[in-house]
Amino acid sequence: MNNLPLLTIGVALLACVLCVIGVHTYASGRAQRQALVERMSQTGQLPALPGRRRRFTGIDRRVRGTRAGRRVERKIAATGLDLTPGEYVVATVLALLALYFVISAVFTPFFGVLAAIAGLWGAKAFLDWQQAKRTEAFINQLPEFTRVLANATQAGLALRTALAMAAEELDDPAGHELGIVADQLAVGRSLDEALGELGDRLPSRELIVLVTTLILANRAGGQVVTSLRNLTETLEERKETRREVTTMLSQIKVTALAVPLLGFGFLLMINAMTPGALDKMTGSVLGQLATLVSIALYAVGGMLIRRMSRIQV
């Protein structure tokens, strides 16, 4: 029983390793399936494949009926994840329970409660990260997108037709998002509304500039090809600059993550050297307040490091 903390840590690390292996296996299998579908689509029309079976449909209906559930649904749609709000809520609850029990076993139940509260923020941060990741991938495709539009408009095609052509030629996420725009235009939506919703789903300065250029060109006409050519060169330069800035700031981002992890590592060392020290520390109101203050200071320090390292390109 004296080695219970070490045993718990070992089990938690093993579970994390198995989880990473499972996610990697699932992602590789899905990528292979997508590649097979693309190869089969080149030889002829594919048979209709059944969609993924949705789970927790009852919970999903209840979640969609609330205002918070509708916000979650819009957020998930912006991330491109194949999830329903009900599946997301159930996964979040299970993750919070697992986080509580693991942290309670490694530290104390007081830290388990704090970890569960932090997990609520982490669930929202996960969607924000997925949306930022998808937006970043879309931004990297913007030079190619503007090049396709410039070539299509120079060939005499209308802007609506050029957008549909770009949706077919570009990979995801640009192909998927432009496909949504093309479908909206096909059912009678205006170009301003369709492109405006695209900018809302993937907010970025580059996309706002592109959307504004396309809307103004559609309203007033003018040299669309010249504007798109110039915009392509500008986006290429911004893409290289963003890559350089990200590389330069990678060490600072790692530091912002390592500082709080070192603090929790010191707590484990103290508890290992003096068994029961964390129980005594969190067993009194004064110790709990001191713990909350120290965690808040670590959080503020990490936020300040990330804020100072944030550079708008």
Image (cartoon, rainbow, N blue to C red):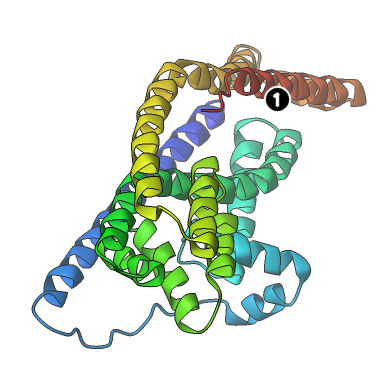
In this view, the residue in front, 94 or 181, is 181
Q: Residue 239 in the image: state x and y as whole percent.
A: 38, 33
152 sits to left or right of 311: left
Classify mark 1: residues with Cα within 10 Å, few (<14), some (14-19) or many (20+): some
Q: Residue 297 in the image: state x and y as whole percent.
A: 75, 19
Q: Residue furthest left?
A: 43
Q: Residue 265 in the image: state x and y as whole percent.
A: 57, 19
Q: Residue 40 in the image: state x and y as whole percent.
A: 13, 75
* Residue under pointer 1: 299
Q: Secondary structure at mark 1?
A: helix
In this view, the residue in front, 170 or 209, is 209
Q: Residue at x 73, y 22 (%)?
A: 300
Judge whether residue 222 can be spotted in this image.
yes
In this view, the residue in front, 264 or 298, is 298
187 sits to left or right of 111: left
Q: How many marks?
A: 1
Q: Residue furthest right?
A: 285
Q: Amino acid at mark 1?
A: Ala
**Quarter occupied by residue 274:** top right
Q: Residue at x 37, y 66 (%)?
A: 163
In this view, the residue in front, 151 or 38, is 151
Residue 295 vertical position relative to residue 111 in the rendered view, above or below:
above
Q: Quadrant of the N terminus?
A: top right
Judge whether residue 22 can be spotted in this image.
no
**Quarter occupied by residue 233:** top left
Q: Residue at x 59, y 41 (%)?
A: 102
Q: Residue at x 42, y 73 (%)?
A: 182
